Structures are given as C-alpha cells and as structure tokens.
Image (cartoon, coloured by chain):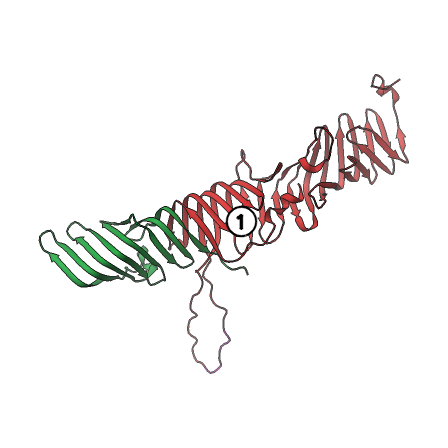
Amino acid sequence: MTAAVLLLAAATLPSGPLEFKARDMRIEPQERRVVLDGEVHLSRGDLNVMGEHAVAEYAKEQQPAPRRKPRARKKEAAPAVVGGQSFERFTVIGNVHVERGSRTADGEHGVMDVKAQTLVLTGTAQQPPVVRDGSETLSGDRILLHLDSEDVDVVRPKVVLRRSLSEEGQPMPVKVEADHLLLLQARRLARFTNDVVVRRGDAVVRSPKMEARYDADGQLTRLELRGGVDVRQGERRATGENADYDAKARTLVLAGDPKLYDQGDVLTGDRIDLALDSKEVRVERARGRLRPEAHKGERGAP
Amino acid sequence: MARATADRLDYQRAGARLQASRGSGIIQPDPGSRLAVFGSLHFVADRVDGEIANRKGVASGAVRVDAERGDVARTERIYYDGDFLRSDARVDAAGPGYRVEGSGLLARTDGSVIQLTDGVKGQLQMESRQ
C-alpha cells in the first residue's frame, strides 16, 4: 500500500465540537445518547463521516478524584457527580463514507472512539471496508484508522499495490493478503503478519511475516519476508528462511538455506535470485542435482 | 405537577377555551418518568390559545422551554395535540454537549420522543482526550 493511503489518518483530530447535519435528531436522555437519522454528515477539521444513521453516546459520568480528607472533619459529604456533558463515541451505520484530505474510506459500520482517537470501519462479507487513495485500494475485515497518528490497522487485509511498480507497458499489480496489517506512516512501512500471501502474475510467495517499505512518493521500494519463505512460479518452487523483493529490479532474493526445486532439479547455494519477469534464476555458490532430461522440449533446450 | 401564570388570561367557559398573554408555566415531572431526567421544565410564550376539553392548544411568540438539567429550546410556534407537541417552525435547542437547529419538532408529552425534524444541523461536544 502506498504511503499516500497511510495518510488517510494524517493528522490529529482537533479537539472541540463535532459539526453535524442530518434529516432528524432524536434526543434520548435516558439512554444517554443522541440519534441522527437520514443523510447524516459529521465533520471535524478535515475529517468528514457520512452515513444513514448515527448514534452519539455521552461520556460516562465520572466521579471526581477523591480529595484528601481533612483530619478535623467528622463526615465527608458524598461527592457530586460530574461529566456527561460531552460525547465519547459516535457510531455511524449504513453506507458509511469517510473523507480525510484526499483519501476516502467506505464501510457499512463505523465507530469513532474520541478518547482512543480511532475510527473502526467494518463491512459485510460481500462488501468489506475499503480505503482508497486514487487508484490504490486497501480492504480487509476491519480497518482501524488512528486519528492521532498516521497509522492504519487492518485485520485480514487485501491489498493491491498498483503503484508499486514502475513497469513499462501494462503494470502487473502485486496483491497481498494476510491476517493482519499495520501501516506505520511515519516509518513508511507496512507490516503484514500471519499467513502472508503475495501474488504477482503467476508468482505466489508465502511467509509468516512481511514488511513493505515505501519511498517519499508512496512508491513501493522493497518487500522483506521473514520466518520461512515459500515461492512458487509455474512448476518452479523456491524456499528460504528470508526473502527480499526489490521493486525496481523486480527480483526476489532468497537467503537462509535457500533451495530451488524445478522439475527434478534441486539447487541450493548461498543465495538465490529470482527474476520474476524473465523467470531467470541465479544461484550463488550453487550445489545440487540437475536432471537435464526433465527439460527436454523446453524452449531453448538442445 | 404543573403550575402556570399569565399577564392576562381570558377563559371562555363554552368550549373551555382559554387565551393567555405572556404566559409561563412550570412542570415538575413525576419521579421515574422519562421526563424526570430533565428535572423541572419551565415554559414561556407570548401567547397561548387552548381548548382544554379537546386537549389542544398552540403557544406562539418567543416560545421557550428551559429544563433544569440545562436544556433550552426556542421556537416561534408550537402545537399541543393530545399526547404530542409539534412545531413546523424553526427550533433552536441546546443542552448538555449539544447545540442544534431544526426546521421542526415532534415530541411526546411523556418525554418518550423528542425529535427535531425536517433538516437539522448543529454541534456535538466531543469528550476531551485523556
């Protein structure tokens, strides 16, 4: 995902009142909430949240901090209840649309927690929540936007990295899936963990964790896969403890007891470089077993 | 419990109609009722026309309601019809953490519904960060 998408939550939400517009507003003091219905629009600073309904919940009443008891007093009066003058949580339901700066996000359900400075978007199985920045799209089961930093937390992310490659002609997008994604904007880093699957053309790479790094323009520069990597492309398979993908060179370098399996060939070495476009392989300090007969009939074979 | 006063009150026994100018009233909701959370409610209006037998009325001219808990609502006209209060005029209201302007009002006199209608805009005060 590009750094630009990470900027969805680029600045701290300014304190103060939240502006709203809607068709109707219901005041429900016993439920300690206010309900907005019909074309709801909430805004604060550069944050705009739209939806069909919204529920604003009052902050819980707080007891004041206990004061030190004066020794001379016999009986302390019960502390007065304070608070309940402001809202701590806004739930927006139905066609939720979020705008912040040039970025947008969509979902079916959004919860803004004022104290935590977070906005959590969820959707349905058919329509998961999505964050967009131009042609870039990030979806997942649950998207948490940090309003006080530039970070985004995604459960079961599905990312298409369209701007990740400066390829000539038709660019080949890199698709990434994982159990969890944490976007750290300040470090221009996307950290995928648990069952990471990267697809690019016919190449599929699996690893327990992966970090994607970006440059200042939001272009992907590098993928770093750690903890055991499995690469498959056509009938070729490669494994290693670690792998680094160079987005500019479009090569994947396997290290840490790397092995290449290709139609009966088994090669190992200090490192294995896979060129994903040309499908060329370079093995440093190679050793292994080759079966030339298995490659008869291939283009370029004698 | 309710009490009311007016600068002038005309009462027509036939039809049990009343007209009050510069009327004001105070309602003390029953404890435990949905209105009780507001505390006592104080009403003022330049003019009040009512049909007591039919439980109908209209208050007009600088109508204002102040609740003990801090809510304030203002409008130019409000209708009372049985269990409902309605306004088709602009309503400005404010209370704990909110300020709102609406094009109308619909409320049940028992407090179970209090709704500003037909286009609302305003502000909701957000809890400060800890």
For chain B, give the colour. green
Residue A53 in the image: state x and y as whole percent: 43, 44
* Element class at badge 1: strand
What residue span does the magenta drawing correspond to?
A66-72
Quadrant containing the N terminus of chain A in the rendered view: top right
- How many numbered callouts? 1
In this rendering, would A193 be left or right of B90?
right
- What residue type is disc 1 on? Leu
- Front in this rendered view, residue A91 or A295: A91
Quick check: is B98 in the magenta stretch?
A: no
Give the labeled residue for mark 1: A47
Quarter of the figure with residue A37: top left
Q: Is residue B1 visible?
A: no
- Front in this rendered view, residue A123 or A12: A12
For chain A, give the colour. red
Examine the rendered structure and indicate whether residue A14 appears above or below residue A235: below
- Front in this rendered view, residue A46 or A98: A46
Q: Overall secondary structure of the magenta stretch?
A: loop
In this rendering, would A300 be left or right of A121?
right
Label 1 crowd (10 A; few <14 / some 14-19 / many >=20): many
In this rendering, would B28 be left or right of A9?
left
Residue furthest left in the image:
B14
Quarter of the figure with residue A163: top right
Residue B57 in the image: state x and y as whole percent: 20, 52
- Pointer 1 chain: A
Which residue is depicted at the point 69% across and 36% down?
A: A197
Residue A46 in the image: state x and y as whole percent: 54, 50
Quadrant containing the C terminus of chain A in the rendered view: top right
Residue furthest bottom in the image:
A72
